[in-house]
């Protein structure tokens, strides 16, 4: 447009206005006329360049004076604003009442301060105006200027000047080409850390646009992140993308002016493509880059570069040195492009998936389910079948196939001393003591007044309630710890040091029992009256604790102290209660019954410190026996204590 206006200004004498001094009576005056001396028949005039010397001098006469003068322009580049400043569209010029948007052109044409209204003669010279169209279009085309003139008597004339732009033949450019050195057929090639992906791009007409569309499950998300969510990269028109790619490739990938209007370019993907390997592509995957070029002759070429990643054959081994039977975990060494990893205890049906953690490591671990116990405390249980436990064999699956040489058999776990109740000795002379000679894991409330725990003829522990001196109720009991009698009261010190190597899933025990109705209520039992004549509860529980000393419970003729229940507190003054397994027996069992009592855990990560008191197992014929409340005829037989994993 600037060139267009500059040339208009250079020919500012297009219009020359003449006014007649003498007026003829209006009814005698002729109407307006338009004369083209060099082309009286107004034939179409050819022109082919901005420098053409054309004779387009038009003489307009209007003896009655010009009332209106409109020039209608029929010219595609002028009408559509092609090549004009800010896309200004020129369709007509009103020389009498110029529109605001064309006033500056009219002023340039007429000269500053000149007016057309009432003029009787005008010389209009389009000789310099028309050739300017050649600078706006090369097409073979017609361009017309229609002059509509009306005088003050209402007479009018219309004349059209038509000009033929002789078209410029568009040169025929060779089609663009892309040549991949060493891979002229653009066959898929293996993805490697070092690659030669140099593509010579030739576009004799000059490159107008260049796009690269990436299809790669590994690289596409990265491209989308720097390209407004798209994998189609505009390497010429997107400056922000060009900057991001320069950072990724170190500037080796041409973008922007390095492509625009270039006729030959070395398009180098050698840096961008190997980046795929840094993001662990899956084995057996293809990654494609489709290059699409359009040249200035609107010829298009598209080529696809495909890179295949065979990958390393997936493998799985078990890091047996990492087995932790307390945390119930093991690390698996997984290499290659594994798509799935799973494990299960051998002989079971369901496979448990294993996914890499934040460090990319495959760790087999238990699934913990959160819940509330009857006291409203938060407890956790292991989802059955998950985690690595003692005394079991596990098998592993990789990409849906069982790995034959990757079985893991864990250590057998921990043993409960004298768990089969086969070892018995005497304490303090004639008191039955449920331990082998030299051992002191178990104890009971046996004293000189009552035998509350002894070995029955079948070789099991027999616990029986007693009425001491015929009037004082004492429940049968056995527990891990120590007992001391002082006067008419005894203190049971719960807890033993135990070297845990494996977390138990449950406590297994064999028992039979006679459970009656509560017929004895201790004077110091705050809730005793509510239990009178109700069904008694015989109880067995095991507790994992982390205590710095034993916890004492004193009971007898005095006020009992130290009562505790692992199901109602997660810690005592001596330290933490980590987890427990508890069984309430409310029905008599005439025959031995095997039962597995599952553990619940307050803390899934803690492990008792070495040397601390860490285990309590307790059996009592009456749950409230410490308060001297219970059934005086209750009996409990127990045998074969062992951990279930």
Image (cartoon, rainbow, N blue to C red):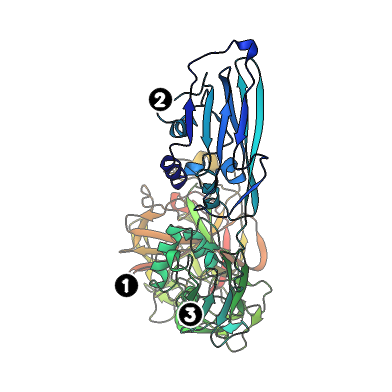
Q: CA distance from mark 1 to mark 2?
A: 111 Å
Q: Along the horizontal axis of the image, is 444 left or right of 519?
A: left
Secondary element under disc 1, as helix, strand or loop, is loop
Q: Tell me where residue 309 appears, x and y as whole percent.
A: 57, 81
Label 2: how many residues lie within 10 Å, few (<14), some (14-19) or many (20+)?
few
- Mark before the other along the chain sequence, 1 or 3: 3
Nearer the observer, 376 or 192: 192
Q: Are marks 1 and 2 in contact (CB under 8 Å)?
A: no
Foreground mark, 1 or 3, reads: 1
Q: Position of residue 458 (x, y in %)?
A: 60, 76
Work out whether residue 608 or residue 635 is closer to the camera in this orientation and state it. 608
Q: Secondary structure at mark 2?
A: loop
Q: Secondary structure at mark 3?
A: loop
Q: Which residue is mark 1?
A: 611
Residue at label 3? Answer: 423
Q: Which residue is mark 2?
A: 113
Q: Is residue 446 visible?
A: no
Classify mark 1: residues with Cα within 10 Å, few (<14), some (14-19) or many (20+).
few
């Amino acid at each position: 447009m600037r060139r267009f206006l500059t040339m208009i200004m250079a020919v500012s004498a297009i219009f020359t206005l003449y006014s007649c001094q003498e007026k003829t009576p209006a009814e005698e005056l002729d109407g307006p006329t338009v004369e083209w001396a060099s082309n009286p028949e107004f034939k179409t005039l050819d022109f082919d360049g901005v420098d053409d010397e054309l004779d387009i001098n038009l003489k307009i006469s209007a003896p009655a004076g010009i009332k209106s003068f409109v020039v209608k322009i029929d010219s595609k580049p002028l009408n559509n604003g092609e090549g004009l400043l800010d896309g200004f569209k020129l369709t007509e010029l009103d020389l009498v009442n110029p529109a605001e948007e064309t006033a500056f052109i009219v002023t340039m044409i007429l000269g500053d301060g000149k007016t057309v209204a009432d003029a009787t003669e005008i010389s209009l010279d389009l000789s310099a105006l028309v050739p300017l169209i050649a600078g706006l279009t090369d097409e073979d085309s017609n361009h017309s200027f229609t002059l509509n003139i009306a005088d003050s008597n209402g007479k009018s004339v219309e004349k059209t000047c038509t000009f033929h732009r002789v078209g410029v033949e568009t040169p025929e450019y060779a089609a663009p080409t892309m040549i991949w050195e060493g891979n002229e057929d653009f066959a898929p090639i293996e993805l490697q850390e070092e690659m030669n992906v140099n593509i010579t791009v030739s576009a004799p007409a000059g490159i107008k646009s260049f796009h690269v569309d990436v299809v790669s499950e590994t690289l596409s998300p990265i491209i989308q992140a720097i390209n407004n969510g798209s994998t189609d990269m505009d390497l010429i028109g997107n400056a922000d993308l060009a900057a991001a790619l320069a950072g990724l490739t170190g500037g080796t990938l041409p973008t922007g002016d390095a492509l625009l209007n270039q006729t030959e370019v070395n398009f180098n993907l050698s840096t961008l493509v190997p980046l795929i390997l840094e993001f662990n592509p899956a084995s057996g995957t293809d990654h494609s880059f489709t290059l699409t070029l359009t040249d200035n002759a609107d010829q298009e070429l598209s080529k696809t570069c495909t890179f295949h990643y065979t990958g390393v054959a997936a493998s799985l081994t078990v890091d047996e040195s990492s087995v932790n039977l307390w945390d119930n975990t093991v690390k698996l060494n997984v290499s290659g492009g594994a798509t799935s990893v799973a494990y299960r205890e051998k002989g079971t049906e369901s496979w448990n998936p294993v996914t890499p953690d934040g460090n990319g490591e495959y760790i087999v671990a238990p699934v913990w389910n959160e819940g509330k116990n009857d006291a409203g405390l938060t407890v956790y249980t292991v989802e059955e079948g998950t985690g690595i436990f003692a005394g079991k064999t596990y098998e592993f699956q990789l990409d849906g196939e069982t790995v034959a040489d990757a079985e893991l058999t864990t250590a057998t776990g921990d043993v409960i001393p004298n768990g089969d109740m086969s070892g018995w000795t005497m304490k303090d002379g004639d008191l039955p003591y449920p331990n082998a000679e030299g051992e002191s894991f178990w104890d009971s409330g046996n004293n000189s007044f009552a035998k509350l725990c002894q070995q029955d003829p079948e070789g099991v522990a027999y616990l029986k309630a007693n009425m001491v001196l015929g009037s004082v109720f004492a429940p049968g009991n056995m527990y891990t710890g120590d007992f001391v009698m002082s006067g008419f009261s005894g203190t049971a010190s719960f807890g033993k040091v135990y070297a845990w190597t494996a977390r138990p899933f449950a406590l297994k025990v064999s028992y039979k029992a006679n459970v009656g109705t509560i017929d004895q209520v201790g004077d110091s039992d705050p809730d005793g009256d509510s239990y009178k004549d109700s069904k008694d509860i015989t109880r067995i529980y095991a507790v994992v604790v982390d205590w710095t000393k034993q916890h004492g419970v004193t009971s007898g003729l005095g006020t009992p102290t130290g009562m505790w229940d692992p199901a109602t507190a997660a810690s005592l003054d001596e330290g933490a209660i980590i987890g427990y397994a508890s069984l309430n027996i409310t029905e008599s069992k005439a025959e031995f019954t095997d039962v597995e009592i599952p553990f619940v855990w307050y803390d899934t990560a803690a492990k008792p410190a070495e040397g601390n008191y860490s285990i309590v197992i307790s059996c009592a014929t009456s749950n409230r026996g410490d308060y001297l409340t219970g059934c005086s005829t209750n009996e409990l037989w127990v045998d074969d204590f062992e951990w279930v994993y």
